[in-house]
Structures are given as C-alpha cells and as structure tokens.
Amino acid sequence: MKKYLKFLMLLPFVALLAACNLGDSEPVGKYAFETDAQKILIEAKLPSGVYDTDEIYICGPFNGAEAESYVEDAKWRLSQSSVNINIFGVYLDPATFVEGTSLADGFWFYSKNSGLSLTTKKEMATYTSNADLGQRTSVVVSVWGEPVKEYIPTLPDHPGTIRVYVENQAGWEAIALYQWGTENNLGGNWPGAQPTGTEVINEVEYTYFEYKVEDVDGKSQNLIFNNNGGGIQTADIPLTFSADVVDHFYRIFNEKDWEIIENPLQVPEKLPEHEGTIRVYADNQAGWEAIALYQWGTENNLGGNWPGAQPTGTETIAGVEYTYFEYAVADVEGKEQNLIFNNNGGGVQTADIPVVFSAEVVDHFYVIYNEKDCAVIEDPLNREPVGENPENPEPENPEPENPDPETPADPVPVYFYVQDNTGWEVTNIYAWGDALPELFGGWPGAALETEVTCGGVAYNVVESTATAYDLVYHPIINGSGAQYDTPLVTLAKYNFLVAGEASAELGTAPAVKIYVDDQTGWDAFAVYSWGDGEPFGGWPGGTYATETVNDKDYKVFTVPAEFFGGSCNLIFNNNGGGTQLSDYNVRADRDYFLTVTAEGVTPIE
C-alpha cells in the first residue's frame, strides 16, 4: 500500500490555498471585485461569520508589518464584496510598498475581532502573489485565531457515540457502510448507512458513520464499505463495538482493498516540495565515496558528459539520507532516458535504468546496494532506514558462513572482434554481467587498439578471459564523451560486433584470407589444410583467386566462415604434382600474408 499517496491527495487542497477560483459562491459571469488596471487586486474568501463590526487588514513585509502583526492603515484594509458577503478585497499600489519588497515575499490577514489568518493546523497562514497591475490573486482564509507554536493533532469529541471513519483513496464518488453480524442491516438495508459527515484530521479528510453507543455496544459486526451500491465493495471487516473504543479508522485503496489505520494522529511524512523540477534520488548503500548520474537516450549526455551530473544536494526522508539530482521539468519532459549511477568515474557503475520523465511524476527513488546493483524504491516514506535493504532481502536460508571451498574452473579465453565505425578518436568496450566479473576490467573497459583484417575487413580485437562460455554480458561501447549499450552477448570463444556512431549490432564470424606471394616457380600452385577440418577440401586442396594489395599481386585462398578460429596446417603443393612443403600452422582468426618459396614459408610483416 503506497501510503505516501496521502500527500498527493492533498496537492489540490494546497493549490486551493495558494490561489483558488471562488467558483459557485459567485453568480456566473460576475466577479466579487473587478480588477483595476493601475493596481493589484487581492481577494480573500473568509470563514463564515459576521463581519459588520470587524476590520480586516492585509499584512506583510510589503507594508512594514512584522510576523504576527498588522499595520492599521486604511489603504491596507479590505472591503466586503456586494456579491458575496464572505469575500473581501483590497486594491494595492506597488508604488506604496516598502522599497525592495513585493507580495512574493509573503502576506497574511488580520481580523481585529478574531485574530490572524491560520491554517487548519492553527499555524499562521501566509500567501504569496506574483500578480501584475490589472490582475487578481484569490486566496482562502481557513480560520482565524492565535497561532499555536506546535501543531498537535487531536480527535474530534463526540460524547455518547461511536464513529467509523474511512479515508477514501479508492476514488469512489459515493460511499456507504453496510453491516451484518449480531445485528443484520445495522444502519439500513443494502447498500447500508449513508455518511454522517466528514472530518479533516491531521490533514486527511475522512468520511464517518456515527452510531449511538447504546445501539452498538458489544455487538460483533462485519463492515462492508461500498460505493453506495454501485457494484464495488470491500471484503468483510470484522469489528466488535465497545464503549471503550469510540473511534475506528480505515483506509480504502486500489479499487476495493482496505486496511486499518492504527494511528490517525501520527503526523505524516511528506516528500520535499520543489516546484517546476523533477528529482532523481539515490540511496547510496553501496558505500561509494562519490556519486554521479550519467544519462543517455532521447538526449545523450543529459546533465553532462561522462561521468555525468554532480549531485544537486541531499535530503533526509523517513530517516534515509538521499543524494538527489534535479532537472527543470521543461528540460526533461517526455524524454526517454537511461540512467547510470556511478562512483563519479571511479570505475564502478550500475546497469542502465530506463525512465520516461513526466511532469506528473516529479520524484524518482532508487537504492544502490552491494557494489553496483540498483533497484527502484516504490514507497520512500515507508521503508527501512539506511543499513537495511528491503529491496534486496537476505535469503530465508542463507548459506553457512564458511562453506566448503569449491575448486574454481579454469578461465576460458574470450575474443571480441569489433568493426569500429564510430568515428570517435578513442573507442573503448566495457562489459558487465549479473553477478559476473567485468569482462574487460573496470570502467571504461579496454581500448579498441589491436587491429586485424578478416576477409579484407578491418576489425579491432580485444582479448580477455571468462569463467565459462554461454554467460550473458552487457557490452557498452564508450569513448569521446559518448556511450551506448550494444545488444546482449551470450559469450562464445569468438564474439562479433559492428559498432556505429550511436548503436551497435551483433555480427557473425567472417571468412579469412591467406594472401600468398608465390615465389616457388612451380607450374601449378595449391594449398591443402588439415587440423580442425579441411577448409579447402581434400588433397591437393583448393585453388586460388588473385588480388592486388598495395600494388602487389597475391594468390588468395579463402577459409570459409564456418572454420573461423580453427587450427589450419597448410601444405603448399604444386597441385598434386609430387612437390610439397612442410606443414605451416596458422589459426584462422585473421588474414595472413605469406611468402612461399620452393624452400619454405615466411610471414610478411
């Protein structure tokens, strides 16, 4: 259950306090006050009451009022509307404000009969406005009085009755309460009793159903909340009424789930407010000394080149300290990004974390644990403090602390052949796998420096070892301030990638060529190969093509792709005419240039 949704439900109410449309309290098409092109209009809807003998003043730094005080001057006094008796207004001339101040610095109201404008928590209510000349700002005063220094929520008194409260997070348009048990149809036949009223308790609005103590005391009932017979209902909720417990609190969420609210007076934790921005929070349980956030996707290098953006700040939320990165909504709205948390370029990083930024979700929470694992935090207001990791719990039956050691398998050789078409000055390849060693060392991995040709095509070859074949790795091509993920690779001895400027694709084994500078003087020329197959067929072997490389003519024998990486023992001969050379061994993992004479074979460097 995402209890922090309570905060989201309050957003419309907060917005109402800041600036509201006075709505149905005014006749359609007519305002309580008309604007004045030379002044700023402030309208305030006041609590119901009698204001005939009262004086209401607007106060703030703009007119020299100090906190919880007012300045008694006619130009700051509000007038009552002739349209709605609970709406008061005042026209303000910024030229009369204290120099260097504005309504954006905050303002409040003072009633000579009733005191200061307060919030429902009995705290001083302050407002702001960025209105220009000829514009209005409308606000609501919830209550008058003297502010309390510390808000202590209390339950309403209701002598002689028992109340059943329900917080409707399911979004039902109507709600009823049916009961069966000791007394069936208690409160009425299906769909049951209609609400007695509503109460705002600790900033949460509840619907409540009220019963006389003598009517329900001692009865064992089953409660069923429903959307007033509209087809949606909770399961039975057992409850035994007692005069000793006069308040029962429940919450309905999702479509019809329910839970008991154990402590409705507990002050709810809230997420920090940050208008106009989106935040990405990280709980660094990996113990990194520094943290950065790199992004690629719709916009590569969003926030900066590798290792990415530096933190905007830190916040402690529900006992957990988070590092956060902040972006203007206008800069990221709608972008499909991949996040990579890293230890500020120190060689440790998470895998890509996909996110689509939206103004509707302004907070994203993640936990980094173990060395570089990462998980989404679904409910940051209800999780264990730092040191615990509910996203990665301990197994129920952990292995013994000192298991018998196993003899590790010998590492196996791994080769990556990369066609580097990035156009970058420097290109690297990094590869990680779940719970596996980094294939080419820490970030940024191995440079693409060793170049060979296969079938006349240039490849960069990177060599490493792995614990076994058939493991899944995530390669990342990076360099020159850019990076991207390649498709997943299931390890074989030989692996092939074609790397472009912004993406890569898997390749296949190429054919390789044996280029021969024939200086034998033989009338005929062929080559036979044995070892891992016969790539040129049976004796005396295959015939050749001719190619010119760097103005020199060569006889070229092609080893088919299916023999790539195999051992080839070459026997050059005069096409079975009785003359042959000793075996010359090569591995078919690249092109070879050879000089062949009647005496032997030598490589051309």
Image: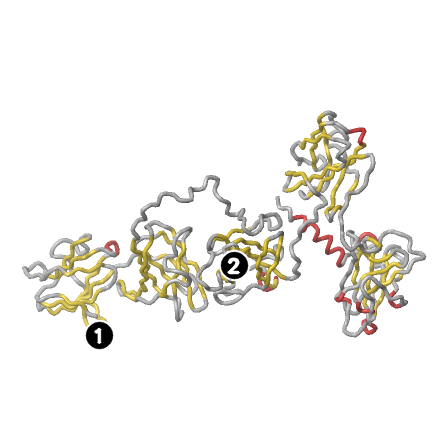
**Precedes in sequence: disc 1 or disc 2:** 2
- Dot 1: few (<14), some (14–19), or many (≥20) neighbours within 10 Å? few
Mark 1 or 2, which is nearer the eye? 2
User: Image quadrant of residue 265?
Assistant: top right
At horizontal 72% and vertical 32% (from top left) the residue drawn is 178
Return the residue at label 1.
551
User: Left of 436 or right of it: where is 128?
Assistant: right
Display colour scheme: secondary structure
For marks 1 and 2, give the CA distance: 50 Å
Horizontal and vertical percent position of residue 435: 41, 51
The number of callouts visible is: 2
Pick whichever, 130 or 163, lies toward us: 163
**Residue at numbered disc 2:** 337
Density class for disc 2 (Cα within 10 Å; few <14, some 14-19, many ≥20) is many
* Residue 340 vs residue 405, the one in the foreground: 405
Task: Tell me residue 399's x, y (percent).
Answer: 42, 42
Q: Is residue 249 left or right of residue 503?
A: right
Quadrant of the rendered image containing residue 604: bottom left
Where residue 78 appears, x then y in whole percent? 87, 62
Which amino acid type corresponds to the residue marked 2 in the rendered image?
Answer: Gln
Amino acid identity at mark 1: Asp
Q: Is residue 464 left or right of residue 177?
A: left
Residue 310 or residue 507, whichever sits in front: 310
Q: Secondary structure at mark 1?
A: loop
